[in-house]
């Protein structure tokens, strides 16, 4: 154990003995702190308070929060609340914000670790596209006084997290100016599966599944309106929103409700190849925030969660009424020929890819092969998973979308699909998944 880890372990033990980590966190106390820091007190719609208290209760009762975890939860919550106050204040001074039109946004989703991030970043090489950036989702408005140092502040915060979780950068390279996942936006109203990844809080996940995601995506649209209004007011032209998050697969009906002209792109990958990577990422993300980490429980949770996700993609393909057909992207195609794959997405949505954008994508793919992800190797038993059992569970998904096995520990025959070609599978030894082409 490192010196930092030993110090934090002692701090956790002391806080636990003193009962600090079991103390209830109250929404009204955090509302008061946010109002004091923001210097304003009007939140407008207060429907987020109930979800906030559910989240706080679940974290205290179920997540075995460490000292770092309790501090991070409180810091995050106050930041979200402060942002809500700033958004409301901006709307009072400029009512035109909520009149901004978010037209025909593209939502990229699919299994995590399937290439959604790589595809998203490639599409950001086109100057016609825009995405919420990491620093914008953390601080959507500049400070009222002093220099605007939001990018520098977020850079420092990311470095601090990487000191707590040094494996994170290799698993998910991220900077302040990277495009950010939409779960960070919906977290502002405390209706986000982002919390379910960071903390072990099954009661919160059960509640959110039952409550639905429409309020979260109504806020999501409002947040984009604020970003777009600021850019248009500064003289920029409103571009095409390209948004990304694997968790979108659990909210497809909500996306259709809030964005009836939304376009969907599903990225597909062999689920067995995905599960070990996403389980490891969840383990790395949770580790600083909890006193009790169970890799086997994480493996079971991720397997069940993404089995449901694949079922939702199957049902969406069959019955989700959208303005345009869903675009399907295969991971192996994406990493084999990134630009050609992006061109196929553009053709599907009847968009024009300029020569400049095409050249910029080529440069990006050359500078950051595989999206900048480092190679990794994972063992099935580390997370209590069995390759054969997982392959059987996900067979319907693989058949429906013609997904070829990338790792076939027991030399399974390729899974047939409905006329969708896929590249040759990669085979690896039993029990070990070599992650030499891992993208997120």
Image (cartoon, helix red, strand yellow):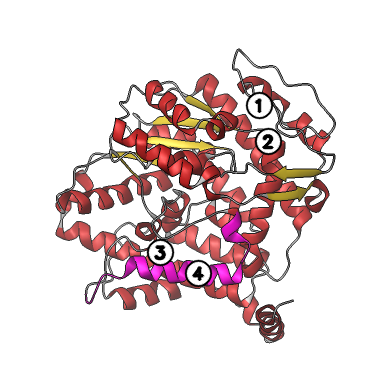
Label tally? 4
Answer with mark 4 or mark 2, whichever residue precedes in sequence: 4
Q: Nearer the viewer, mark 1 or mark 4?
A: 4
Magenta region, main secondary structure: helix
Q: Nearer the viewer, mark 4 or mark 2?
A: 4
Residue neighbourhood size for the residue with mark 4, other residues' Cα within 10 Å, grouped as few (<14), some (14–19), many (≥20): some
| Residue at 82% across, 34% down | 388
Question: What percent of the width, then of the height, locates residue 173?
Answer: 52, 55
Res 264 visible: yes
Let me know if residue 164 is in the magenta part. yes
Report, in whole angstroms, how far the alpha carbon at label 1 lies from the one at label 2. 9 Å
Vertical order, 164 against 248 (above or below): below
| N-terminal-most mark, 1 or 2 | 2
Q: Which span of residues is magenta-colored?
A: 145-170
Please report whichever mark, 3 or 4, sits nearer to the chain's N-terminal start: 3
Name the residue carrying label 4: 159
| Alpha carbons under labels 1 and 4: distance apart | 38 Å
Residue beneath the point at 33% across and 38% down = 126
Q: Nearer the viewer, mark 1 or mark 3?
A: 1
- Please tell me the numbered disc located at residue 80: 3
At 32% from the left and 25% from the top, the residue drawn is 351
Q: Quadrant of residue 244?
A: top left
């Amino acid at each position: 154990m490192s010196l930092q880890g030993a110090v934090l372990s002692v701090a956790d033990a002391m806080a636990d003995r003193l009962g600090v980590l079991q103390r209830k966190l109250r929404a009204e106390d955090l509302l008061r702190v946010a109002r004091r820091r923001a210097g304003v007190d009007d939140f407008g719609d207060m429907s987020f308070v109930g979800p906030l208290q559910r989240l706080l209760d679940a974290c205290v009762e179920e997540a075995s929060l460490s000292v770092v975890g309790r501090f991070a939860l409180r810091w995050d919550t106050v930041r979200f609340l402060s942002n809500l106050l700033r958004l409301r204040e901006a709307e009072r001074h400029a009512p035109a914000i909520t009149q901004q039109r978010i037209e025909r946004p593209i939502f990229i989703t699919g299994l995590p670790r399937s290439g959604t991030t790589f595809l998203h970043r490639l599409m950001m090489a086109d100057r016609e596209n825009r995405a919420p950036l990491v620093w914008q989702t953390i601080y959507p408005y500049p400070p009222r006084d002093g220099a605007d140092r939001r990018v520098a502040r977020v850079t420092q915060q990311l470095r601090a997290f990487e000191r707590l979780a040094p494996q994170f950068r290799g698993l998910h390279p991220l900077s302040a100016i990277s495009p950010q996942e939409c779960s960070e936006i919906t977290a502002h109203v405390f209706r986000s599966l982002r919390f379910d990844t960071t903390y072990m809080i099954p009661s919160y996940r059960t509640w959110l599944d039952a409550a639905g995601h429409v309020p979260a995506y109504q806020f999501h649209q409002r947040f984009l309106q604020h970003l777009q209004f600021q850019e248009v007011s500064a003289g920029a032209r409103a571009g095409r929103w390209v948004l990304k998050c694997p968790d979108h697969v659990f909210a497809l009906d909500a996306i259709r409700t809030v964005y009836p002209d939304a376009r969907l792109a599903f990225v597909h990958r062999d689920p067995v190849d995905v599960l070990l990577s996403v389980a490891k990422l969840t383990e790395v993300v949770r580790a600083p925030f909890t006193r009790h980490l169970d890799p086997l429980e994480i493996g079971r949770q991720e397997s069940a969660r993404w089995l449901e996700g694949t079922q939702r993609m199957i049902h969406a393909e069959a019955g989700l009424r959208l303005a345009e057909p869903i675009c399907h992207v295969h991971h192996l195609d994406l990493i084999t020929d990134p630009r050609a794959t992006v061109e196929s997405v553009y053709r599907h949505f009847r968009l024009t890819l300029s020569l400049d954008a095409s050249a910029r994508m080529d440069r990006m793919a050359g500078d950051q092969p595989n999206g900048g992800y480092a190679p990794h190797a994972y063992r099935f038993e580390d997370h209590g998973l069995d390759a054969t059992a997982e392959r059987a569970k996900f067979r319907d998904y693989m058949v429906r979308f013609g997904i070829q096995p990338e790792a076939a520990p027991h030399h399974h025959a390729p899974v047939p699909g409905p006329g969708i070609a896929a590249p040759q599978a990669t085979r690896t030894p039993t029990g070990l998944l070599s992650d030499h082409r891992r993208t997120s």
